[in-house]
Image: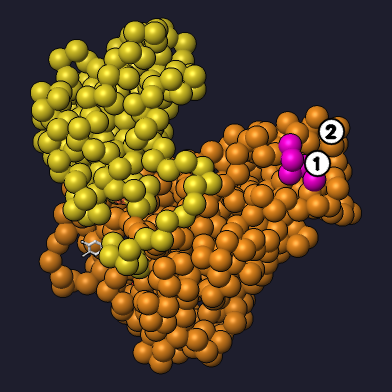
């Protein structure tokens, strides 16, 4: 998603808050006076700052001629907006209907226990932020979750520790500031625990005749 | 004029990309280059969509299409002439494919689809039961055209309906044809589209809006995503025609942020239309003004519902509000507004171009036309199918889904 790309600055140098505010102001100048500007502006602002701190919301409110409480109310309503800094990796557990009935809730429960945080919070070491997602259309292989841009299918609660461990290992090797999603392929391939969950069926495996139960037709 | 001997249509839908289409394409290009064939190849470069076909002599064309609907078999490539269907491709397979099929003319059986029960090889796209039993109308372009080319969409009859609607028909004429077709909304409520348009056409207002619902909230459903990724212009065209019918000057497509590829292709389609005078001021010289913007969702559960969706475009909390007033009278910014689903809109150009009678020739009298379904869960062929309305569910699951 766009905001993720915008934060994933590859040069590693941190821009100062002042510089970031300057960029926000440019965006605000462009959007000022356009009907329905608030949400696109917040989406871009989150891309610039990584999250939406109070002083950013105040500036947005001021420049778009809205009250702070209206802006905060909108931010609170939409799941994609974060008012706290987010972790190095964002975990999103799917709670779409199909995932929910096939164990998504248990996956989320295990994740909360393992990390010791609630949905929307970030672990104390700054590694993980836990979020829930609606269906992201990685159909069929419920329950599903995403860590950054990697999709995990058929996740079992018992595997969660193993999956998270691969990120801790990778974390050591990755220089700070490097976007997690751009970890080298090789690092991913050695993460055997991940391989097991992301590739439940081998390529060209014979197709097993499925039972009639569990067939879903949507539309 | 270039003569293209071979077309390699590679699926670049969300499913195939996540199963590795990008790597397969890189390997294909590498193998073509290794055999000194690159000067003969034209590559559909998504990076430079404005001149997608300008490289090489174009003897071999590598095209990125939208979702084929058969995501379970991805990555997928279809080779024309012949319509050879290659599936579950890996980068390592490309050397053999280029050498054997492209150079020596011997299709590679190993990479073809096998009948799930008899294990017999089925080389051709059209013979695979999954495709053979379908009636592709809304999805007639899927996997057949580059999803980023306006020219290819036009080449298959695109924007003929727009020209007809704007140049030959009155707004009321469009509404009458839609009512006669009996098309019902595909977004859930099943309201007759022509009636909905008529309600919004009646009130006098300084501004009206025409919206597309691409929020697709149902888990496991990805029909709309597939249409947006493989044939974005069909949706844009449906909106232009609808806007003309009700007299709207501004449109919005509300698309969930979880569909970045759909947003990218819609954005490009809209830009292409602006460049060609199909959107903006004085469309096709008729004096009709209409433009479309995309509103990206922000992850709220209820925004698929129409009043919540409108609040969200306004930049407010996406909470549903009681009706009446109905959106046809007071919708977005309290102006008369129509909201239609993606699949509903993709039917519109077909109805206007081919007529209501053609549309009614399949389906049931109360629900004419076709419907797209997403099969997920325990079927052999997970994917997307389009069948006539009224086809029993069992037939879809056994014959198309492979049981
Ligand atoms: C809770 C709720 C969620 C909905 N989600 C969607 C959706 O994701 N996509 C959609 O097209 N319609 C959805 N609808 C239906 C829309 O409100 C609206 O009826 C539809 O988009 C109209 O388009 P149509 O007439 O072309 O079907 C939803 C309705 C409700 C009540
Ligand atoms: S389709 Fe995928 S993401 Fe959506 S609910 Fe099902 S498993 Fe979860
Ligand atoms: S994405 Fe390739 S068939 Fe669906």
**Which of the two residues, B90 or A57, is positioned nearer the viewer here?**
B90
User: In terms of image quadrants, where is residue A84?
Assistant: top left
- The secondary element bearing badge 2 is classed as loop
| 2 or 1: mark nearer the eye | 1
B96 part of magenta stretch: yes
Q: Residue at left 26%, top 35%? A: A92
Extreme residue in the front direction: B118
Q: Residue at left 56%, top 66%? A: B118
* Colour assignment, chain B: orange
- What's the distance in space between the residues labelled 2 and 1, CA to CA? 9 Å
Compared with residue B5, is residue B174 higher up or lower down, i.e. above or below?
below
User: In terms of image quadrants, where is residue A9?
Assistant: top left
- Please tell me the numbered disc located at residue B35: 2
- Please tell me the numbered disc located at residue B288: none
- Please tell me the numbered disc located at residue B99: 1
Looking at the image, tell me whether mark 2 or mark 1 is earlier in sequence order.
Answer: 2
A55 part of magenta stretch: no
**Disc 1 CB within 8 Å of nearest ligand 3 atom:** no
Compared with residue B204, is residue B265 higher up or lower down, i.e. above or below?
above
Q: Is residue A85 visible?
A: yes
Q: Residues within 10 Å of mark 1 (few under 14, many from 20)?
A: some
In the picture provided, is B152 more to the left or to the right than B36?
A: left
- The secondary element bearing badge 1 is classed as helix
Q: Position of residue B189 (x, y in %)?
A: 27, 74
Q: Position of residue A110 (x, y in %)?
A: 14, 33
* Chain identifier, yellow in the render: A
Q: Residue at left 72%, top 50%? A: B108
Question: Decide: marks 2, 1 in contact (CB < 8 A)?
Answer: yes
> Mostly what secondary structure, the magenta segment?
helix
């Amino acid at each position: 998603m766009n905001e993720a790309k915008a934060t994933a600055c590859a040069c590693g140098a941190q821009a100062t808050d002042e510089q970031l505010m300057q960029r926000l102001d440019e965006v605000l100048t462009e959007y000022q006076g356009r009907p329905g500007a608030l949400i696109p502006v917040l989406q871009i602002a989150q891309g610039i700052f990584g999250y939406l701190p109070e002083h950013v919301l105040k500036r947005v409110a001021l420049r778009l001629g809205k009250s702070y409480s209206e802006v905060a109310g909108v931010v609170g309503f939409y799941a994609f907006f974060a008012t706290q800094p987010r972790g190095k990796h964002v975990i999103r557990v799917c709670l779409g209907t199909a995932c929910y009935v096939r164990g998504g809730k248990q996956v989320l429960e295990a994740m909360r226990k393992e990390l010791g945080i609630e949905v929307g919070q970030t672990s104390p070491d700054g590694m993980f932020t836990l979020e829930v997602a609606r269906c992201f259309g990685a159909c069929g292989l419920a329950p599903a979750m995403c860590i950054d841009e990697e999709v995990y299918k058929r996740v079992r609660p018992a595997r969660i520790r193993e999956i998270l461990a691969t990120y801790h290992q990778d974390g050591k090797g990755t220089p700070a500031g490097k976007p997690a999603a751009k970890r080298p392929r090789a690092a991913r391939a050695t993460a055997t625990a991940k391989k097991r969950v992301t590739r439940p069926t081998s390529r060209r495996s014979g197709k097993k005749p499925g039972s009639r139960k569990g067939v879903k037709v949507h539309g | 004029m270039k003569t293209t001997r071979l077309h390699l249509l590679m699926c670049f839908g969300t499913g195939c990309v996540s199963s590795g289409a990008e790597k397969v394409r890189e390997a294909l290009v590498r193998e073509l280059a290794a055999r000194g064939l690159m000067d003969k190849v034209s590559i559909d470069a998504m990076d430079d969509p404005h001149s997608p076909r300008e490289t090489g002599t174009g003897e071999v064309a590598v095209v990125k299409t939208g979702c084929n609907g058969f995501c379970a078999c991805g990555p997928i490539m279809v080779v024309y002439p012949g319509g050879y269907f290659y599936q579950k491709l890996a980068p390592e397979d490309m050397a053999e494919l280029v050498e054997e099929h492209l150079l020596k003319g011997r299709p590679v059986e190993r990479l073809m689809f096998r009948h799930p029960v008899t294990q017999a090889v089925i080389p051709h796209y059209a013979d695979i039961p999954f495709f053979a039993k379908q009636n592709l109308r809304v999805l007639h372009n899927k996997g057949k055209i580059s999803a980023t080319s306006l020219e290819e969409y036009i080449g298959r009859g695109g924007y003929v309906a727009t020209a007809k609607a704007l140049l030959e028909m009155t707004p009321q004429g469009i509404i009458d044809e839609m009512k006669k077709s009996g098309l019902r909304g595909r977004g859930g409520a099943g309201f007759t589209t022509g009636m909905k348009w008529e309600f919004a056409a009646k009130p006098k207002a300084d501004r009206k809006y025409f919206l597309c619902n691409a929020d697709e909230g149902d888990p496991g459903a990805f029909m709309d995503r597939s249409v947006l990724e493989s044939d974005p212009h069909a949706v844009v065209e449906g909106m232009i025609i609808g806007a003309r019918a009700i007299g709207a000057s501004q449109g919005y497509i509300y698309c969930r942020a979880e569909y970045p590829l759909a947003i990218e292709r819609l954005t490009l389609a809209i830009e292409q239309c602006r460049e060609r005078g199909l959107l903006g001021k004085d469309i096709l010289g008729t004096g009709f003004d209409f433009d479309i913007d995309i509103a990206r969702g922000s992850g709220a559960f209820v925004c698929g519902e129409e009043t919540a969706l409108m609040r969200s475009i306004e930049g407010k909390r996406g909470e549903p509000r009681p009706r009446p007033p109905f959106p046809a009278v007071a919708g977005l910014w309290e102006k008369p507004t129509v909201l239609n689903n993606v699949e509903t809109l993709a039917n519109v150009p077909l109805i206007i171009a081919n007529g209501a009678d053609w549309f009614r020739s399949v389906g049931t009298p109360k629900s004419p036309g076709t419907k797209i379904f997403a099969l997920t869960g325990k079927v052999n062929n997970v994917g997307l199918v389009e069948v006539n309305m009224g086809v029993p569910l069992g037939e879809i699951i056994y014959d198309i889904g492979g049981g």
